């Protein structure tokens, strides 16, 4: 009746909020995503019953004194997208790191494209693909021809007929990519920690919201 209310995304917020009890811990991306969605659902529900107070007084009274947290919703939504991924714009540092990663990835791709298209290596390359071993970009090379492509061997096939070589030309780029990946993980940890600290600072009121939705 009266346009209905959307309840499909409701979760038990208390389960997520209890994870914040230890200082220094932080919620993961999916937890924060669901918290933001449920805060929005609660805010919409409360507003709906406030507008229809005369018709649904009991429901209005149930929610009227419980605070809403649109600010926290927006903080989380500024960081996490609808696919439950951290946005590039979650922080200036993260944006710079991911931009640098794209530049390096493009450089790595160019290096491999040059190698794969070079007729001198046609017999040596097992497949014209780039794969990953030990977190490094490598190329599959026929074992009998591995000496033709200078680089670091990271793995070999179960048959022993293929080795996975990291060409010398991409070693420094792969090193830089690994450094950026470490920085990216650390920056994401800081972002999640800041969001969790914000929840922790408002924990009593948020628990009230969670209890009201049970």
Image (tube, helix red, strand yellow):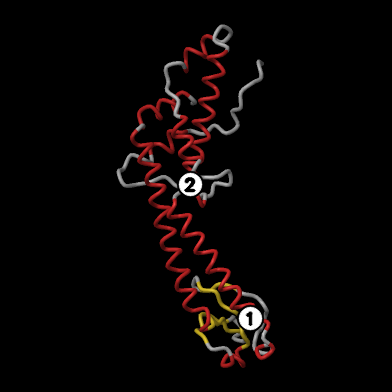
Determine which quarter of the picture holds residue 51: top right
Mark 1 crowdedness (10 Å alpha carbons): few <14, some 14-19, many ≥20? few
Count of numbered badges drawn on the protein: 2
CA gap, disc 2 to disc 1? 38 Å
Q: Given this view, does label 2 or label 1 mark the residue nearer the observer?
A: 1
Horizontally, residue 101 falls left or right of residue 21, namely right
- The location of residue 11, given as percent across then percent down, is 52, 34
User: In front: 153, or 184?
Assistant: 184
Marking on residue 29:
2
- Residue 127: x %, y % from top left: 67, 80
Residue 52 higher or lower than 204, as above or below: above
In percent of the image, x 53 and y 89: which residue is there?
Answer: 150
Residue shown at the point (49%, 74%) measured from the top left = 173
Dividing the picture into quarters, in which one does residue 93 lie? bottom left
Give left or right: position of 110 versus 66. right
Q: Mark number for residue 75?
A: none
Q: In this view, does 51 lie above or below 26?
A: above
The answer to which of 142 and 78 lies nearer the viewer is 78
Provide the secondary structure element on which disc 1 rests: helix
Does 145 sit above or below residue 93? below
Disc 2 packing (10 Å; few <14; some 14–19; many ≥20): some
Question: Which residue corresponds to mark 1?
Answer: 114
Please, is residue 113 above or below residue 195 in the view? below
Secondary element at image label 2? helix
Q: Where is residue 148 in the image (x, y as percent from the top left)?
A: 59, 92
Across and down, in percent, residue 144 comes to 61, 93
Seen at 48% across and 34% down, the residue is 73
* On-image quarter of the N terminus: top right
Tag 2–tag 1 contact (CB < 8 Å): no
- Earlier along the polypeptide chain: callout 2 or callout 1? 2
């Amino acid at each position: 009746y009266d346009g209905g209310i959307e309840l499909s995304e409701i979760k038990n917020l208390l389960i997520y909020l209890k994870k914040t009890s230890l200082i220094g811990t932080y919620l993961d991306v999916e937890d924060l995503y669901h918290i933001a969605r449920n805060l929005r659902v609660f805010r919409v529900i409360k507003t709906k019953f406030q507008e229809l107070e005369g018709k649904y007084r009991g429901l209005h009274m149930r929610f009227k004194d419980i605070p809403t947290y649109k600010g926290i919703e927006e903080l989380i939504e500024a960081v996490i997208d609808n696919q439950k991924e951290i946005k590039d714009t979650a922080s200036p540092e993260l944006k710079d790191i991911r931009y640098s990663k794209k530049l390096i990835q493009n450089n790595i791709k160019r290096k491999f494209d040059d190698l794969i298209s070079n007729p001198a290596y046609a017999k040596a390359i097992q497949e014209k693909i780039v794969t990953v071993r030990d977190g490094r970009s490598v190329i599959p090379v026929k074992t009998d021809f591995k000496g033709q492509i200078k680089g670091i061997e990271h793995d070999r096939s179960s048959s022993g007929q293929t080795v996975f070589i990291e060409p010398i030309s991409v070693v420094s780029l792969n090193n830089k990519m690994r450094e950026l990946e470490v920085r990216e993980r650390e920056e994401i940890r800081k972002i999640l920690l800041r969001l969790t600290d914000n929840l922790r600072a408002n924990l009593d009121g948020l628990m009230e919201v969670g209890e009201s939705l049970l």
